[in-house]
Amino acid sequence: MKAVQYRGAGAEPVVVEVPRPVPGAGQVLLRVTAAGVCHSDIAVMSIPDAQLPFPLPLTLGHEGVGTVAEVGDGVTGVQVGEAVAVYGPWGCGRCAECAQGKENYCLNARRLGIFPPGLGAPGAMAEYMIVDSDRHLVPLGDLDPVGAVPLTDAGLTPYHAIKRSLPKLVPGATAVVIGAGGLGHVAIQMLRALTAVRVVALDVSQEKLDLAREVGAHEALPSDEGAAALVRDLTGGVGAQAVFDFVGATPTVAIAGACVAIEGDVVIVGLGPGRLPVGFGALPYEATVTSPYWGSRGELIEVLDLARTGLVSVHTETYPIDDAPVAYHRLHEGRIRGRAVILPGA
């Protein structure tokens, strides 16, 4: 079967032929219908070999949906032929966090060497993939695979971040979204669907600012040295009750800290190297800074249910599996509008 792999330090992803996997006891074999392309993949491919906590080659793709092709012994939670979405942040299933469905915060994953698909375990960017347990599969129902696959990360991650701040996102409040790309344009829609706040989008790309307006941002402004002052002007000097930074670069976290309100939330989601100083006088009183990771299994179910209402959708570009390296080039150059999706069966 074909798979898209990262095979060594400095190497670009390549399409290779690998054996079709066979599910073991408790495992599920999926025929992949769609796999998402993400900046996290580029981050993984930027890590030197000596620092990687898992062996290479690695089949990429931590966003995946597919059809159950085979099940291993003891699997009873899914049926052959069922359309499902893959919950990516796999955990041990036994610790206190996993017992709550929060496998993204598994207490034992690092010690046990458990990795998400595409981020350590063989991923979804292949014609078939192994899912380690049927608890990591969520029914897809009638959702379109292309539109649904980015929701497993680009939808789940902003949903989890926004949900934590909902008590502060009351009518009259303002939320700022920094970075209107793959995750940010979904976050804007979720804020509009879940709250009555004013949504202000910031980005350095005019095309992404246009997309932000298209999906519901009330304001779309350049993410530059004047951005924080503009946000304060829009809010009568108060600032934003929540700032969601989907970039995480040094300039963007500085903007986030400069435009957050008293008792507001700064949520740094992006993987950039930016750091925000915290201490008395560094930020407005009782401002909270968090850096969440992915989301829970229950939240993925909620995200898919939200998508079924039609209030949230992902702008996608599709590529056959042979063109996956092209999609990564375009992502690296900032030329993807929304989210790139690989179709292994195309």
Image: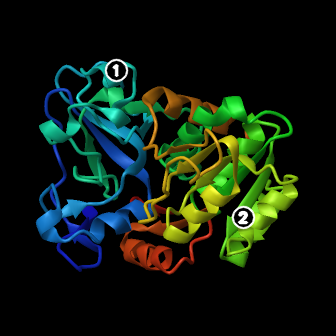
Horizontal side of 246 relative to 6 (left or right) equals right
Give coordinates of residue 3: x percent, y percent.
Answer: 27, 63
Give coordinates of residue 318: x percent, y percent.
Answer: 53, 65
In this view of the protein, can residue 315 be seen by the observer?
A: no
Mark positioned earlier in the residue sequence (2 or 1): 1
Packing grade of label 2 (10 A; few <14, some 14-19, many >=20) is many
Residue under circle 1?
77
Of residues 68 and 8, which is closer to you in this image? 8
Of residues 21 and 225, which is closer to you in this image? 225
> The N terminus lies in which quarter of the figure?
bottom left
Residue sitting farthest toward the front: 280
Packing grade of label 1 (10 A; few <14, some 14-19, many >=20) is few
Mark 2 or 1: the one toward you: 2
Give coordinates of residue 173: x percent, y percent.
Answer: 80, 41
Residue shown at 76% from the left, 51% from the top: 239
Residue shown at 20% from the left, 32% from the top: 108
The amino acid pointed to by label 2 is Ala
> The C terminus lies in which quarter of the figure?
bottom left
Give coordinates of residue 20: x percent, y percent.
Answer: 19, 52
* 294 up-or-down from 139: above or below: below
Q: Secondary structure at mark 2?
A: helix
Residue shown at 54% from the left, 77% from the top: 334
Q: Secondary structure at mark 1?
A: loop
Q: Is disc 2 in contact with disc 1, using a CB cutoff of under 8 Å?
A: no
Residue under circle 2?
228
The amino acid pointed to by label 1 is Gly
* 268 up-or-down from 90: above or below: below
Q: Real-space Cα distance between discs 2 and 1? A: 49 Å
